[in-house]
Image: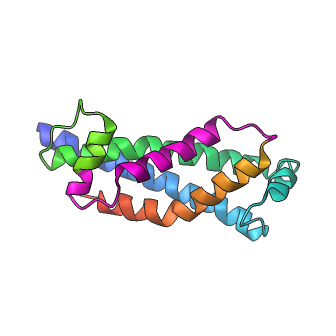
């Protein structure tokens, strides 16, 4: 198998992985929507944290979004490699800047914003319901953007 074929397969694997995470994230938000919890408030988050069968939905959102954010960087690198760019050892900001030159609708400000949402989720404590609500609402509002960017990275 040629090296380029290996990279194409790797790219497809990353693309499929991120699509799976997006679908499961959408499903989790749909579950909250069906229960009339969207948009979230601190009061709704406190309520949700008391319902054992709903806590896994919140956990899934945290996990899936973290995986999306992590995989997105790899997918962008893979896409650029297939476009002939040597981005393997570049800092992520340089990778993002290069991606925007290829028409990918992401810039360093948006990247940092998405990254910050992940960091908030990973380091969040249940007693900060307002912060959890705001972060989850923001992630929900970013789903369309994420799907658009991922679609632009298809080869």
Image location (x, y in percent) of residue 76: 30, 47
Question: Seen in the image, is 31 located left or right of residue 148?
Answer: right
For the point 62% across and 37% down, the residue is 122
Question: Seen in the image, is 48 located left or right of residue 136?
Answer: right
Q: Residue furthest front?
A: 109
For the point 30% across and 62% down, the residue is 152
Q: Relative to 95, is 26 above or below?
A: below
Answer with the quarter of the image where residue 146 lies.
bottom left
Quadrant where the image shows the N terminus: top left
Colouring scheme applied when the structure was drawn = rainbow
Residue 1 seen by the camera: no
Image location (x, y in percent) of residue 74: 34, 41
Image location (x, y in percent) of residue 31: 71, 63
Viewer-side residue, 36 vs 11:
36
Image location (x, y in percent) of residue 58: 71, 49
Q: Relative to 155, is 92 above or below?
A: above
Magenta span includes 118: yes
For the point 65% across and 34% down, the residue is 123
Viewer-side residue, 147 vs 100:
100
Residue 40 seen by the camera: yes
Dominant SS type (magenta): helix
Segment tinted magenta in the rendering:
99-127
For the point 34% across and 53% down, the residue is 107
């Amino acid at each position: 198998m040629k090296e380029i074929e290996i990279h194409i397969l790797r790219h497809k694997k990353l693309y499929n992985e991120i699509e799976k995470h997006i679908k499961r994230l959408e499903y989790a938000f749909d579950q909250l929507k069906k229960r009339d919890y969207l948009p979230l408030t601190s009061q709704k988050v406190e309520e949700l944290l008391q319902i054992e069968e709903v806590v896994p939905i919140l956990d899934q959102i945290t996990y899936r979004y973290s995986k999306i954010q992590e995989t997105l960087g790899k997918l962008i690198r893979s896409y650029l490699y297939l476009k002939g760019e040597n981005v393997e050892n570049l800092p992520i900001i340089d990778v993002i800047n290069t991606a925007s030159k290829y028409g990918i609708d992401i810039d360093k400000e948006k990247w940092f914003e998405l990254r910050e949402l992940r960091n908030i989720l990973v380091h969040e404590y249940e007693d900060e319901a307002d912060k959890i609500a705001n972060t989850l609402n923001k992630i929900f509002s970013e789903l369309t953007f994420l799907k658009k960017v991922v679609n632009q990275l298809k080869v």
